[in-house]
Every structure is written in structure tokens, then in C-alpha cells.
Amino acid sequence: MRKFEEKTLTTEKIFDGKIISVQVDEVKLPDGNVSKREIVKHPGAVAVIPVTSDGKIIFVEQFRKPLDRSLIEIPAGKIELDEAPEVTAKRELEEETGYTTDTLTYVTSFFTSPGFSNEIIHIYFTDQLQKLKNEVACDEDEFIELIELTLPEAEQYMTDKLIYDAKTVYAIAYLKLLGMR
Amino acid sequence: MRKFEEKTLTTEKIFDGKIISVQVDEVKLPDGNVSKREIVKHPGAVAVIPVTSDGKIIFVEQFRKPLDRSLIEIPAGKIELDEAPEVTAKRELEEETGYTTDTLTYVTSFFTSPGFSNEIIHIYFTDQLQKLKNEVACDEDEFIELIELTLPEAEQYMTDKLIYDAKTVYAIAYLKLLGMR
């Protein structure tokens, strides 16, 4: 898919952080003019839609500094170097919820903000959860709280703007399409 | 929603661009430790799910420099200063598709990447389109091509990873939940 390709003329590195890096590319447009593109590079992420044996969805509440508020989201995390997405999915499920699974079903993937970032998120589903005997530690700067909700409760949380991010709003639509009630 | 609040200790401005700005906040965590948060600020965006009178969805194909490829997406654009989202929605629909509407239905909003960005996208739906008599110009650095697809065709495009971004993948789930075929 190279339609309307923009050729890179120069790349200016702006920032190289722990999670993201930022650059400004000068590009040649299809009409020959020159423009600039602001680009945030991200290693990619994985999310899991975990459903318990009694039909509840497990969410995590956490503070999101870019919004200066907390959100209720499905478990997720960024892909570590050379890690397969399924491995990230299982690891984040274990770290954030205390459950594990041997059966992750791939749901879909999407770029979250293709206008300025290459971040992609891969989404998995499981309704085959086993409680871990020993808790796995989260990242040391990660503070989360688990919340189990039925689908109608989750929809109410969406209406109340407590569930309010792309992957989690998508997860709710996905479960409705699966026929969950 | 202030659970697990992270208090800002310092803010380091990194970049102030045309579309995004970047900063690193030093924050005090709930346990008293100090950590850093990399934050991309964005003015927010709006997208429209436009369905024609013969039941086709209008998409736009455009090159996305952060991915170095083109994507097929629902029409969208960023909110200009002090612009109401409904105004952005109508403007982007007109600029990108050559159609207008008087009936936009609000669907949902979501933060695209709450881990590192405050970007929010507001999504609207319309199946009441009128062709504009005079074309409205796109931004001068914007090159797009219109594609009309039935819902099954759009789902195939998703499988083929030509439709591959959060708002458009969500739009397809939304139309399926509406009962569109």
C-alpha cells in the first residue's frame, strides 16, 4: 500500500524516551511539494479481554497521567523487545489480574493513532482463566485495581465515561457481537 | 476519578509542533516514589461513519507517514482551536468526501492511547448524505482517494489489513451491531 507515498527527505530526532521516541520527518508529497510529519514511535501493545467462568469481564483501573485521571480498561501492556504478542498478552494478564490462561484467541489488531504514531495494539480474548497460586509483580511504577463487571455494567461504565479508551470500547462491542449479555 | 493519583513534580517541555506537543512529567507515585511520564498532547479528533442511500460506507485512503504505508479509514480530522466536535465532523466530511449532512448522530468517544497521549476521538454516524454542488478543498498537504464499500467488503478489507486503525475497526463493529449487512 504505497498510494500517495511520501518520500522521506530528512529525519530530525527530537526525543528518545523509555516508551516513545519522537521525530520530525521532512517529506516530499505526491505533488512534489515538501511538508513535515510529526511522528511518535512506540513498540506496540497487547490487550486481553478476560471473561470469568461466571460471565464477568475483568478490568483494571489505573491512573493515566496524560489525562490526569484514572480509567477502567481491559488488561494491556507494551510489547518488550523481541517478545511475541501472545507472550506479552499472557504476561500482562498474569501481572495485572492474577489469572493465567492457556487459550488466548486472537481477535484483531489496530493502529491507535495513525496520523501521528505507529503504535499498534493486538487484542486477544479468553474465557479460560485459571487463578495463579502465586501473584506476579506488576511494574514498580504501576498501581492498579481489579474490577469485575457484567457486560451491562460495563456498558453503563462506558456511558458514564469511566470506560473511555479505544481498546476497551472496542472490547465491549466485540463481546456484544459474540452474543454475550 | 483520582484513584492512584500521580502528582506532577516537574514538567519538561520537549517539543511543540504543528499537531502534537511532547513533555516529560516527573510524578510522585501513590507509594511516594518518583517516576517519569512521557506525554504527547494532541488537540483531539473527530471521525464520521458515512453510509450512502444505497447502503455503502464511504472510506478515504491516505498515506500515513508514521506507518510508511496507506490505510483505508473513515473520514476524520483534528479539532481546530475552539471548534465544536460536530462542526469538525461536518467540515471533515465535506472536505474529504464531497458530501454534507444535517443529521449527525453521536456514537461514542474514546482516548486512543491513554498510556502516553491525551488524544480523544469523537465518532459520529450519518446515513443522510447530500452531494455538495461545489467541492471543498482538503488541507494542502492531504492527498486522499474515496472508496465506497459494502459492510462485507469492508470486513474483508479488515481481514486483509487494509482497514487497520482503531476508529475504522470500531466503526465496522458499530455497523454490525446496528444490524447492517
Image (cartoon, coloured by chain):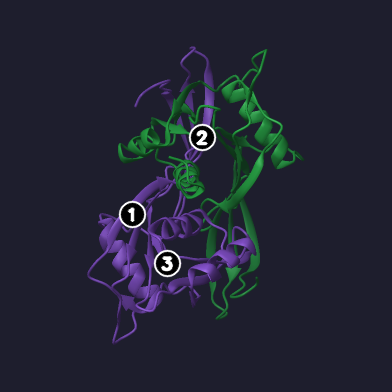
Chain colours: A green, B purple
Residue B75 at x, y = what percent? Answer: 42, 67
Provide the secondary structure element on which disc 1 rests: strand
Q: Which of marks 2 and 3 is in front?
A: 2
Q: How far apart are marks 2 and 3 (CA)?
A: 27 Å
- List x then y, in percent, for residue A55: 49, 31
Q: Which amino acid does label 1 sit on?
A: Val
Image quadrant for the N terminus of chain B?
top left
Apparent side of residue A9 relative to residue B135 in the rendered image (left or right): right
Q: In the figure, A103 relative to B169: above or below?
A: above
- The circle drawn on residue B75 is 3
Report helix, strand or loop for mark 2: loop
Q: Mark 2 lies on which chain?
A: A
The kind of secondary structure element at disc 3 is: loop
Indicate which disc residue A74 carries: 2
Residue designated by label 1: B107
Q: Which chain is mark 3 on?
A: B
Q: Which amino acid does label 3 sit on?
A: Pro
Residue at x 30%, y 86% (from the top left corner): B134
> How many neighbours does mark 3 have within 10 angstroms: few (below 14), some (14-19), or many (20 or more)?
many
Closer mark to the observer between disc 1 and disc 3: 1
> From this viewpoint, is residue A35 visible?
no
The residue lying toward the viewer, choosing from B153 and A64, is B153
| Amino acid at the residue labelled 2 | Ile
Can I make out residue B149 in this image? yes
Q: How far is disc 1 from disc 3 in space, using C-alphas?
A: 15 Å
Q: Which of marks 1 and 3 is nearer the N terminus?
A: 3
Residue at 58%, 39% (x, y): give it.
Answer: A47
